[in-house]
Image: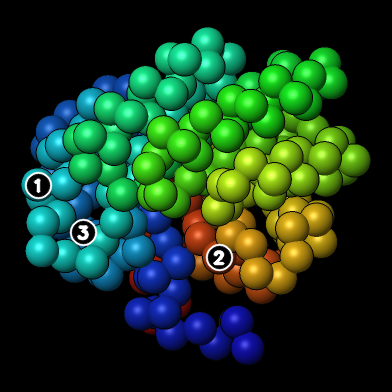
Amino acid sequence: MVLNLKPEMLARHIESTLLRPEATHADVERLCMEAREYGFGGVCVQGSRVVEAVHLLDDSDVKVVTVVGFPLGGMDRDVKRYETETAIDNGAGEIDAVMNVGWFKEGKDKAVFCELRDLVEAADERTVKIVIETALLTSEEIGRACRLVLDSGAHFVKTSTGYAGRGATVEDIQLIRAAVGPEFGIKAAGGIRDTRTALALIEAGANRLGTSSAATVLRGAV
């Protein structure tokens, strides 16, 4: 049963996140040391902090994840591609890229798909998660966005940036899981601040959890 998930197993689902604009090197250092201590699956940092995080997590199993097109997703696709290439060159192991929600809402599915394919190619076989921003989408649109992510060659659908009014919900995860099938990756993010919420999202089908309250979430499972 998911509700009996051991702390060390829960930790592997967690990507401890630090995307505050005012975050300093000292904050990144604390994030990485905590990730080592608790055995988190990854840390998620701004692009300018990738090199630092890679150095701090050298010789550990903790993945360094960074964001692309964060948080709005509306920049030119060539900018997103360059941002992805730079992150990979700097040592990032995984990319969390924000979909162009405006294009998607206009029905420009081909343009969105082409951009996603660009990002997957630029990531050079690293794991790519696409943020679809579920808070801004209808149930039908969530299903449509998931199909684009699947077809693009990306590896995960990610729910949220945390900047769109709300984060992940159990209902979001259930809709995404129904759309992508049993094997595809789902990352729940935004508003995950306690163990009960984390476990409910995993039970609903999430494989990864992005949270800036990682230690609090894990301690509640002890």
**Quick one: 22 or 139, which is closer to the camera?**
139
- The quadrant in which the C terminus is found is bottom left
Q: Are marks 2 and 1 in contact (CB under 8 Å)?
A: no
Q: From the image, which quarter does the N terminus lie in?
A: bottom right
Return the residue nearer the eye: 183 or 192. 183
At label 3, counting other C-alpha atoms closer than 10 Å, the crowd grade (few under 14, some 14-19, many 20 or more) is: some
For mark 2, does the 10 Å Cα neighbourhood hold few (<14), some (14 to 19), or many (20 or more) residues? some
Where residue 138 sits: x, y (%)?
A: 86, 36
Question: Taking 99 as reference, is 15 above or below it?
Answer: below
Q: Looking at the picture, which amino acid does disc 2 mark?
A: Asn
Which type of secondary structure does the marked residue at label 3 adopt? helix
Residue hosting label 1: 55
- Secondary structure beneath dot 2 equals loop
Q: Which mark is residue 207?
A: 2
* Disc 2 from disc 3: Cα separation: 21 Å
Task: Classify residue 193 as left or right of residue 183.
Answer: left
Residue 140: quarter of image: top right
Q: Could you say where residue 83 lies in the image, as x and y percent from the top left?
A: 36, 23
- Residue 170 versus residue 145: which sits nearer the camera? 145
Residue indicated by mark 3: 34
Q: Earlier in the sequence, mark 1 or mark 3?
A: 3
Going from N to C along the chain, the mark reached first, 2 or 3, is: 3
**Residue 145: x %, y % from top left:** 75, 39
Name the residue at 35% across, 38% down. 66
Residue 121 location (% of width, % of height):
46, 37
Q: Amino acid at mark 1?
A: His
Q: Residue at x 56, y 21 (%)?
A: 73
Question: Looking at the image, can residue 174 be seen?
Answer: no
